[in-house]
Amino acid sequence: MSEYTFSIKKYLTKEEQGEYWKSNIGILTELGEKYCPQVELNGGLPITPAYFDYLRTSWMLDENPEKLAQQPVLSALGFAFGFVLEKSLGLKWALIEDSYGEIISLIADPRGDSFKYGNISIPPFSFVEKRAELLNSDALEDGFNQIKEMLGETSN
């Protein structure tokens, strides 16, 4: 099996990150107000994978035919997962290129071979999309914990 490699095309600027925020915050707020109204959002979104798992699972189980469409919800949850990785683990938003093309990803600051598993790239939008039909109510929290473990596994 060959080792996964990628190159950093550029780090996203605060303005570019802000555009993602603006395009997804409405959906995240709507999901929060509908499925988790007991959480006060005046101070901003909770930055936990468990909160976003709750929203994801509640949305998936909602049988209302007029619920929010799948693609905007998955996009918003992908952004939210990336936001958690950035704020909780210090990963950086970047445009990367790999053998499949260019994609937005969160990366650990490159430090050569300091991570046991090599350089780490987590594309949050595709991470969530690949779990669109998975009925695991802890999909984001499980992924977060695996990433956290990988970051802690150094070969120093």
Image (tube, rainbow, N blue to C red):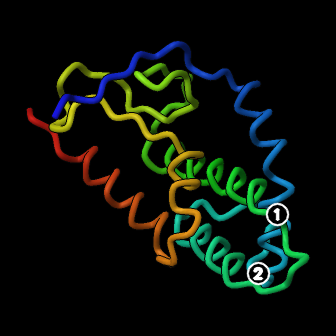
Q: Farthest residue toward the top?
A: 9
The residue located at (47%, 77%) in the rendering is: 136
Q: CA distance from mark 2 to mark 1?
A: 15 Å
Q: Quadrant of the C terminus?
A: top left
Q: Residues within 10 Å of mark 1 (few under 14, many from 20)?
A: few
Q: Quadrant of residue 74?
A: bottom right
- Nearest the eye: 7 or 102: 102
Q: Is residue 39 above or below residue 45?
A: below
Determine whether 40 is above or below 125 in the image: below
What residue is rendered at 49% in x and 63% in y? 140
How would you rate the neighbour count of disc 2 (Cα within 10 Å): few for under 14, some for 14-19, many for 20 or more? some
Q: Residue at x 52, y 34 (%)?
A: 105
Specify whether 145 is left or right of 29.
left
Residue beneath disc 1 = 69
Q: Mark 2: which amino acid? A: Tyr
Q: Which numbered dot is residue 35?
A: 2
